[in-house]
Amino acid sequence: MCPVTQIWRYVRMGAAILLLIGGTVLAPTPIPIGWAMIIVGLSMLVHESRWVRTRIRRLRARYPGFGEKLNQAKRYAPGFARRVIERTDPIRHQRRRARLRVRVEDSRQPPPAE
């Protein structure tokens, strides 16, 4: 990865963390700006960090009711939030891994003898 690209990635991650912190501070206020900041910050972190995606997938797998609520809200969510919900869906991730596993196993088998 190019050093400039790596720098911009860290800048985006830093901005996402600042949004999360600011959103956490502003969440108790009557205006829901804090929640919006938390959602945007999490979506940026999910996009940039595989570790965050994995943690959210585990959270959704552990609490299926939470994951189900997110899946129901997906159709009303804006595009960036919809992509975050899809990228952190544990069931979708398991299906994708199973398909990749089948492809790898198929590529390891020798070709049929003629």
Image: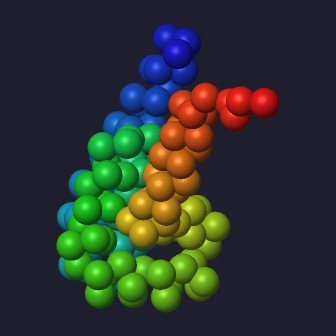
Report the quarter where the C terminus lies: top right
As drawn, the residue found furthest toward the front would be: 114
Q: Position of residue 13 (x, y in %)?
A: 38, 38
Residue at position x 46%, y 30% from top? 9
Residue 22 visible (yes or no): no
Residue at position x 44%, y 41% from top? 48
In the image, residue 22 sits, relative to residue 59, either above or below, namely above
In the image, residue 25 sits, relative to residue 98, either above or below, namely below
Residue 56, by quadrant, is bottom left
Coloring scheme used: rainbow
Q: Position of residue 109 (x, y in %)?
A: 57, 33
Q: Nearer the viewer, residue 20 or 55?
A: 55
Residue 61, by quadrant, is bottom left
Residue at position x 42%, y 80% from top? 70
Residue 63 visible (yes or no): yes
Is residue 17 toward the left or the right of residue 41 in the image? left
In the image, residue 6 sits, relative to residue 50, either above or below, namely above
As drawn, the residue found furthest toward the right would be: 114
Residue at position x 61%, y 72% from top? 78
Q: Position of residue 81 (x, y in %)?
A: 53, 67
Is residue 19 toward the left or the right of residue 82 in the image? left
Q: Nearer the viewer, residue 73 or 26?
A: 73
In the image, residue 2 sits, relative to residue 90, either above or below, namely above
- Total tally of numbered discs in the picture: 0
